[in-house]
Amino acid sequence: MKQFIPRFYQHPNALLMRKATAVLFSTLWSGMTVGSCMQQAIAVSSNKTTIVNQGTYSFRTHADGPLVKGTTNTISIREDFGLIDPNGQILGCGGKPLADYTGFSVGLHEVKGKGLKGEMYGAPVKLTPTEVPDIPGNDIPLGITPNTTNQNPYPLNNTAKGRYSFLLDRGRGQIAVGRDYILVVNPPITETRYVQRQVKIEILSLETKGTQEVVSYRATSLDGLPIAPTGALQIKQTVVLIPNSEQIGLQLLAFQITGAMCNQNQIELTKTGDRASAAPGDTVIYRLGVNNKSDGSLKDIVLTDTLPLGFKFLPKSLQARYNEKPTPIEVQQNGQVLTLNLSLKLPKDESVTIIYAAQLTPDALRGTGKNYANVDAHRVDNGAEVQDGPAIHKVRLTAGIMSNCGTILGRVFEDRNFDGEQQNGEPGIPNAVVYLEDGNRITTDPDGLFSVKCVLPGYHTGVLDPLSIPDYRLAPNRYRIELNGPSRLVRLAPGGMARMNFAVTPASRSGEKL
């Protein structure tokens, strides 16, 4: 029998960082046929891939001799390769591809640090260039689809239906345990319906389990929006590293169609009132509007409405209307907080209106008149939470008949008969200054008059500033001794009026100044 001479072949599908080598057998004997059974192992480590080879043969020693058949021993070869890939697809909220990916891009970035709003992303990760198809001998490893050149950031396209891929180089420490990245999805610059997505990816472990080597990583939403079809904000996955890497990876739920979950305007809440101002005893009718701006139906709609101080909720006034028809609504009240529960499922682009009334009590004058409302709901398709608010409506408060404010009226005048009262022919003194006990500075008009509105009831004191009337001094009063001083004390009743007059006389009459 002639000696077998081994030859070496390369399996093109076993390329990622380096070419794996498979061993086949051949012979110089005539009439011999050789078959090969190339079985690529399912489990491949992040730096070594196992190629399982087994050759079959058949031959005759001479033309009329018996046919001899056989099978070679199984040969397993492990060869290094260095790239693994987190990859995925940008989907709509319902788990379906977007209608148009033009202008969208996905980038894998380094973690720059923490700012006021949490962790920030830095420069894009420097990835090892790849190529498809592989050109032997140029030291550029074989890439994967759709990002065949390992471009970072990677522009999405409609052909791949929003799929993306990145290959990480283990030889550069890019899958070392503890490495962190931030995956950033940017919408088109001209697109106002979508917001930028940020997802942190943390390499948790790198282990060998039997013939498999697996990487565990955690993906966490940094923007408060879901990253999974279930609406989860954080997911943890264990990935078996295999050459066919485009079959394994993070499926990122990042965007949705008009008004979708990842758009911050996924649900819209508006609040209005039937009046801009009100007084104690008045009734204000509030109207709340909930508009579903997502691409799916909403359920578990709950509104939280905080009434201002002194506003009394009128339960019999509560009603909800959908498609111009009444719909059931439940209310729970805890102090000034109303919790309104709607049991209906609200389809996309539809809205529901809630109406109720509140009556103002005298305590309302001590409040701000501001009303705050928020709404929370869940998507029917994946249970993800959506919310909006606060929606604010302010009622300007007026005292009405409940007012306890008063008014102080006064005049600085020349008292010619020294009786403390102004008669015809006694002119007012303009630009005289009067100070109240709370520091208010009041200047008289051309007729010597002044007034202070909305003064709290009680005792108040006013003092005439002598420096503001250098040509006058206080006039003596022949009838009331308490009016001979520079200050005046008045008692103001709730909602009442008090007079505060100052009588002066020219200083030239006595040759002195006040």
Image: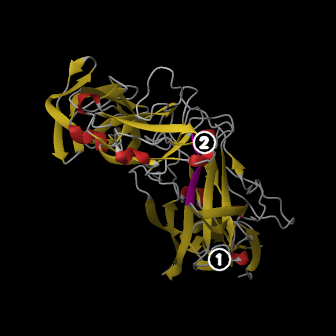
Type of amino acid under label 2: Ala
Query: Residue beneath label 2, please?
Result: 507
Q: Position of residue 493 (x, y in %)?
A: 26, 39
Query: Residue beneath label 1, please?
Result: 47
Asked if residue 107 is positioned above or below residue 480 in the image, the reply reads below
Q: In terms of image quadrants, where is residue 50? A: bottom right
Q: Is residue 507 magenta?
A: no
Which residue is farthest right?
A: 138
- Of tags 2 and 1, the one toward the viewer is 2
The answer to whether 184 appears left or right of 435 in the picture is right
Residue 302 visible in the shown view? no
Q: Residues within 10 Å of mark 2 (few under 14, many from 20)?
A: some
Q: Residues within 10 Å of mark 1 (few under 14, many from 20)?
A: many
Disc 2 + disc 1, Cβ < 8 Å:
no
Residue 417 visible in the shown view? yes
Label 2: which secondary element:
helix
Which segment is the magenta one?
194-199
Question: Where is the N terminus found, in terms of image quarters?
Answer: bottom right
Asked if residue 185 is positioned above or below residue 311 in the image, the reply reads below
The CA distance from mark 2 to mark 1 is 106 Å
Q: Position of residue 396 (x, y in %)?
A: 37, 32
The one of 28 and 15 positioned closer to us in this rendering: 15
| Residue at the image point whose x is 48% and y is 34% from the top | 259
Label 1: which secondary element:
loop
Q: In terms of image quadrants, where is residue 500? A: top left
The answer to whether 182 appears left or right of 382 in the picture is right
Type of amino acid under label 1: Asn
Q: Give the total number of marks visible in the rendering.
A: 2
| Residue at the image point whose x is 74% and y is 73% from the top | 27
The answer to whether 385 appears left or right of 168 in the picture is left
The tag earlier along the polypeptide, 2 or 1, is 1
Q: Position of residue 451 (x, y in %)?
A: 45, 33
